[in-house]
Image: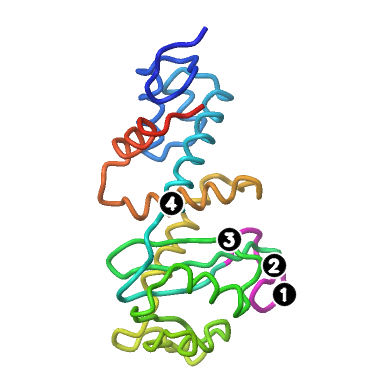
Amino acid sequence: MTITNRYVKRSRISEARFRELVKCFSLDLDAHKIAFLTGLNRNTVNRYLLLIRTRIAEFCEQSSPFQGEIEVDESYFGAKRIKGKRGRGAYSKTPVFGILQRGGMVYTEIVPDCAKRTLQGIIRGRVDLESVIHSDSWRGYNGLVDLGYQKHYRVHHGNNEFANGKRHINGIESFWSYAKRRLMKFHGIPKATFYLHLKECEFRFNCRNKNIYKLVLEMLRKNPLS
């Protein structure tokens, strides 16, 4: 039997119960705690969380081009370091590229590698040419000026330089720290759903000063789950 629910098509739970689930989700509780607090079956909770995260990922992908003071950086998520392995991309980790507008939003994308062609292709599609780009000294950022980005400043971590006035990437590095700390509570995330969890981190960071509960309900009211 289906129940009337503005946020879920052909819903089998009441709108009030679904709102409870969304409220718990907005508080960043895990599926086990949500099931306990709402009285819903764990499989039902997992199903709705997957659908909600999918909507959030779709929302994040619609972000507008970045402009102004921009920080770019890549990071790696996944297994712990294996002794003896060195270099970027080692340890069977998943590479993720990030773009952050200072004082604004962040955008993340899982990438196959951190090669120049890969990173600069994303930058060209997401960053306005008039922007000021800040990066580290990774060779993947070589030649941005040739692409039309006339203001590109670098910080050289290899020389123990982490900030030089406005030349730093502290903002995007803070996001990486936040995302990794948050994902640790899941005690391992399957590769199949890592993208959705990453986008949830992005969404929560970008909306850190907003009411997540109201935002999610508004999003689902416009585009109900099915």
81 in relation to 137, above or below: above
Q: Which residue is mark 4?
A: 60
Q: CA distance from mark 2 to mark 4?
A: 28 Å
139 in relation to 117, above or below: below
Q: Is residue 206 left or right of residue 146?
A: left
Q: CA distance from mark 1 to mark 4?
A: 34 Å
Q: How many residues crowd around disc 4 within 10 Å: few (fewer than 14), some, or many (20 or more)?
A: some
Question: Of circles 1 and 4, which is in front?
Answer: 4
Amino acid type, mark 3 = Ile
Q: CB of mark 1 within 8 Å of CB of mark 4?
A: no
Q: CA distance from mark 2 to mark 3?
A: 16 Å
Q: Earlier in the sequence, mark 1 or mark 4?
A: 4
Q: CB of mark 1 within 8 Å of CB of mark 2?
A: yes
Q: Which residue is mark 3?
A: 110
* Residue 16 painted magenta: no
Q: Which residue is mark 1?
A: 85
Q: Earlier in the sequence, mark 1 or mark 3?
A: 1
Q: CA distance from mark 3 to mark 4?
A: 13 Å
Question: Of circles 3 and 4, which is in front?
Answer: 4
Question: Of circles 1 and 3, which is in front?
Answer: 3
Q: CA distance from mark 1 to mark 2?
A: 6 Å
Q: Earlier in the sequence, mark 3 or mark 4?
A: 4
Q: CB of mark 1 within 8 Å of CB of mark 3?
A: no
The range drawn in magenta is 76-90
Q: CB of mark 2 within 8 Å of CB of mark 4?
A: no
131 in relation to 29, above or below: below
Tell me which residue sits at (71%, 64%) in the image: 92
Q: How many residues crowd around disc 3 within 10 Å: few (fewer than 14), some, or many (20 or more)?
A: some
Colouring used for the render: rainbow
